[in-house]
Each structure stands twice: as C-alpha cells, then as structure tokens.
Amino acid sequence: MRRRVLARLVFVSALVALWQAAWTAGLWSEVLLPPPGRVALWLGRSLADGTLAGATLVTLRRLVLGYAAGLALGLPLGMLTTRFRPFHETVGLLLLGVQSLPSVCWVPLAMLWFGQTETAMLFVVLMGTVGSIALAMDQGIRSVPPIYVRAARTMGSKGLHTWLRVIVPASLPLVLSGMKQGWAFAWRSLMAAEIFVTILTGLGLGHLLHYGRELHAMDQVIGVILVIVLVGVSFDRLIFAPAERALHRRWGTGRIE
Amino acid sequence: MSSLQGELQPSAPEKLVLRGVGKGFPTQEGTVRALDRIDLQVAEGEFVVIVGPSGCGKSTLLSLVAGLDRADEGEILADGVPVTGPGRDRMIMFQEAALFPWRDALGNVEFGLELKPGLDRRARAEVAAFFLRLVGLERFRHSWVHELSGGMKQRVALARSLAANPRVLLMDEPFAALDAMTREQLYGDLERIWSERRKTILFVTHNVREAVCLADRVLLMTPHPGRVQEGFPIDLPRPRDINSPELAARAGAITRALRTALEPATRDGMP
Ligand SMILES: Nc1ncnc2c1ncn2[C@@H]1O[C@H](COP(=O)(O)OP(=O)(O)OP(=O)(O)O)[C@@H](O)[C@H]1O
Ligand SMILES: [Mg+2]
C-alpha cells in the first residue's frame, strides 16, 4: 500500500518536473504554457475565494441528477427490451442510435428546445447516458446463464422473485461495467453542455473552462482541466472501484496473474 | 388411474409414473427424438439409477420430471398428479452445480428456504446451517462459490436441494466431475440421507459401477431415439463397497447388456 502511494507520488512529481523543465527551456510561449507554479497559484486563489468549490458543486449536482435520471430511465428500459421482443426490435434500435450519437450533438437541440436552462443541461446528460445504460442492462440480462433461472425455478422461484433475486444479481458484473461506461458518458456530456451552454443559474467547471479560454487565461484552463480529471478519478475510485472489488470477490474474477 | 383416485389411495405405491413420454428437439437436420415412448415407474422410497451413453436423453428425462420442460407426448405423474411445472416436492440437481456466485455457501442453501412460508430469517439460517453440516461443509458457510472445490460445490448443491425437503430427488450425474475418493464418500452420504429421510431418488450416471453401488434398480437407456431398455434389480446388501467383486460382477453384466443394446446403432462410446 505505502509503496503504491509512493510510486504514484514519484510518477506525478516527475510529470510536474518535466512540465517545469519544458517551461524553463522556453519551448512554448508563456501564454500557451504557464509554469506549474502559476497554475497552482490559480488553483489556490480560486479555492480560497470559493469559485472552485462552488463550480465543482454545481457541476456535481448536475452530474448526479442527470446520471440518476439516466439510471432511472435506462435500467427499466433495458429490462423491457430483454423481456418483450417487439420492444427490443423497436426501442432497442432507438437506444442503439441514441447511444452511438456523440452527446455533444444534443447541445444545439437542447438549446433550441429548452433555452439556456438547467433543463437543457439535464437533457444533454440524460441523452448521453440512457442509451449505454439501457444497452448494458439488456446485455447483462441476456448473458445470465439459463441454468441459474432453472435452478431457481425448481426451488419455487418465479416471476418477480426470479427477476429480483436471480436475474438482476446474476447480471450485475456486466451491468456495473455498463453503469461505469454510462457514468463516463454522463461526465463527457455534461462538460460538453457546460462549455457550450452559458447559463445564469450556476457556473460549473465547464463554464470556468470556457471563460478561461475567452480570457486567454491558460493557468485557469489547465487548472480546471486538472480539477475535472480529479473529479473523474475520484468517482471511479470512491464509487465504482469498491463495487467492482465486491463483485470480483464474489465471482472470483479480476485477477489475471 | 385418475388423479382423484391417486389422492384417495392410502399409500400410493408409485411416486413417479411416466407413460408414453416423448420429446423431440427441432434442429437444422430435422427433429432429434431425445425421448421416445418412455414408460417408467418409480416407487415411493425407491432409488432408481439410469445409465446410458452420452446423448441418449437422460438430462432431458430429468428436466421433464422436474417440470422444467414439457413433454411432447405422454404424461408424467408425481403422486398421481400430472406434472405441469416445477414443484418443491421434486428437486433437481443439475449436471453442473449451478450455485449462485453472488451468494456464499450458506446463502445458496438458504435460497430455497426463502420461498417457504413461515420461516423467519433466523430459522432459515439454522436450517441451512444444519444441511451444510450434513454434507460436512459447516466450516465453509461463508465461502464464496469460487472458493469451493468442484466436489464441495456439488455438496453445497446437494445441501441446497435437501434443504427444500423434497420427497423426490432428481440427480443428473452429480458426481461425474469428482475424484474417486470424494465420490465414494458422497455415495455414503447420499445413501445415509436417502435411507434416513426416505427420499425417492432418480439418479443419472455414465458410470455402471456407480449405478450398481447406489441403486435398488438400474435402468438402461439407449439413444436415437432415447428409450428405456430393461431394468436390473440390485438386491446386494447395503452399505455397499464399490470395489467388491459381487458389485463388479453385477456391473459387468449390465455393461454387457448395454453393449448388446447399443450394437445395432453404436455411435457414442461408453466410458
Ligand atoms: N435444447 C436442446 N436443443 C436441441 N437438442 C437438444 C437439446 N437438449 C438436448 N438435445 C438433444 O437431445 C438428445 C439428448 O440430450 P440429453 O442432454 O438429454 O442427453 P444426456 O443423456 O443427458 O447426455 P449426457 O450424458 O452427455 O449428459 C441429444 O441428442 C441432444 O443433442
Ligand atoms: Mg446429461
């Protein structure tokens, strides 16, 4: 554990040192590549005056809301497409289309429909997420070994009980990886929405990034990117990684050596 | 015999009755007759073992009796009542253990009990623990499925089947994947459970010696189409030793009969 942390610390320090060296060598213009110190300074200042925390909170709220909506819609849709064939052939196709469309494409449509509002944001995130989550649920359920269902049926399980106690848990490994992918899509969609939709109801990280560009403030641009990376990694580490570990422990998967 | 008569009869001697049962599977090359005109009776408390080469329809037969699939022709009665679906009075153990990886050993055994009315959480855990002890796995109650060996998995599956307290156990080559030592130990366990709890058992195997070691009656099955041939009553005293010469002699006779039965249409070899 200590060694892993140390290794990472060394790696990150090396990256920063390289960056600093590139700046010292003057390879790029000052405007295009500020030194790490200046970015740190911007991060410190924005942390102190609350801008960064505020923007992160606004973004997280949208993300969680949109992702939750994507799950609430996508998981049942995925179950329906596995359960009813006509549904699979129609709505399933629509979901595939939605999933294959880069979510930034929803931005113009959302702006025209909903104006510069939170609804527009939510819509973009939802559309970016729901397809991949529904398809993952569909896939997950389809790959449940039929023998599990047969075993459950001989023990008297049927209907909803079989769904909740056998099919859903058996599909978890695939569904979880789909949920993780859905989360990644939600995150990308939200950043696209925030960068393109300027609204007054809350400045998110995407907006900070956008204004950084407008002001040619490279320290802000790089600083915000670092925060966005940090948020993404934290979500993975704090929510998905423990869930994956729990599944791996039960299924006995996840070890390659 | 109508089902009403079956119910009224003081002790219905036949636990399972199959009459003219047939089942086909449609494939690209036409229909495969997995089972053809099967007539079979299993008495209450009887231990019947079916032996036959691979693909002769043994698993299909068990799923029909379990009520997991429907026969195309004929009828299947359990306690005189036609089988229309799975029932907890008939528990099937599949060729593979089919344990749920998201539950530990105890949780797997508990699964069947959760659908039993009138059992609270505590009682359920106690009953499940009892059956794990019965198959000698109490120490592994909190192991995940992948942490168990193949034989341990089969024993958990056995405990899971027994916990539901079925009158009839349908066992599909449950010990095929095990080493001889573990297998012999499980023969003993199964025989004990069968005689102590008066189960009716329909057991499938490739292994003729295993059949003779366990059965009151051995049935031969032949493939293409799947048919049940003659039966061999085994009256050797129990407990039996699978390595004894008497048992070997009986097994030899059955193997010869099987070879003769297969001669006209030998396709799959017997081990
Ligand atoms: N779902 C299915 N679809 C098509 N054919 C099937 C199906 N299930 C079984 N069969 C066919 O029915 C026949 C009997 O199969 P079954 O699984 O009952 O054999 P078995 O006696 O249990 O064999 P084994 O000893 O190898 O387990 C085989 O020819 C098989 O190909
Ligand atoms: Mg079989």
Image (cartoon, grey):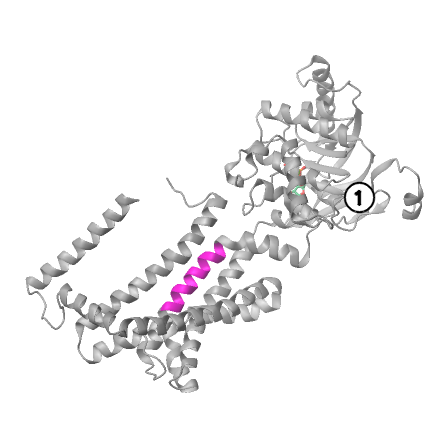
Q: Residue furthest top?
A: B245
Residue A41 horizontal/vertical position (percent): 17, 68
- Residue A112 seen anywhere in this rendered image of the structure: yes
- Residue B94 seen anywhere in this rendered image of the structure: no
Residue A212 horizontal/vertical position (percent): 22, 76
Chain to which the residue tagged by mark 1 belongs: B
Tell me which residue sits at (6%, 65%) in the image.
A26
Residue A138 horizontal/vertical position (percent): 53, 61
Tell me which residue sits at (73%, 37%) in the image.
B169
Q: Is residue B121 left or right of residue A170?
A: right
| Front residue of this view, candidates B57 and A91 | A91
In the image, residue B174 sits, relative to residue A249, either above or below, namely: above
* Secondary structure mostly taken by the magenta-highlighted segment of the chain: helix
In magenta stretch: residue A184: yes
Amino acid bearing label 1: Val
Residue B229 horizontal/vertical position (percent): 78, 31
Disc 1 crowd rating (10 Å Cα; few below 14, some 14-19, many 20+) is: many
User: Is the C terminus of chain B in the top left, top right, bottom left or bottom right quadrant?
Assistant: top right
| Front residue of this view, candidates B246 and B97 | B97
Q: Is residue A47 left or right of residue A237?
A: left
In magenta stretch: residue A255: no
What residue span does the magenta drawing correspond to?
Answer: A174-187
Tell me which residue sits at (77%, 49%) in the image.
B72
In the image, residue B39 sits, relative to residue A181, either above or below, namely: above
Q: Which residue is tagged 1?
A: B21
| Front residue of this view, candidates B194 and A203 | A203
In the image, residue A49 sits, relative to residue B7, either above or below, namely: below
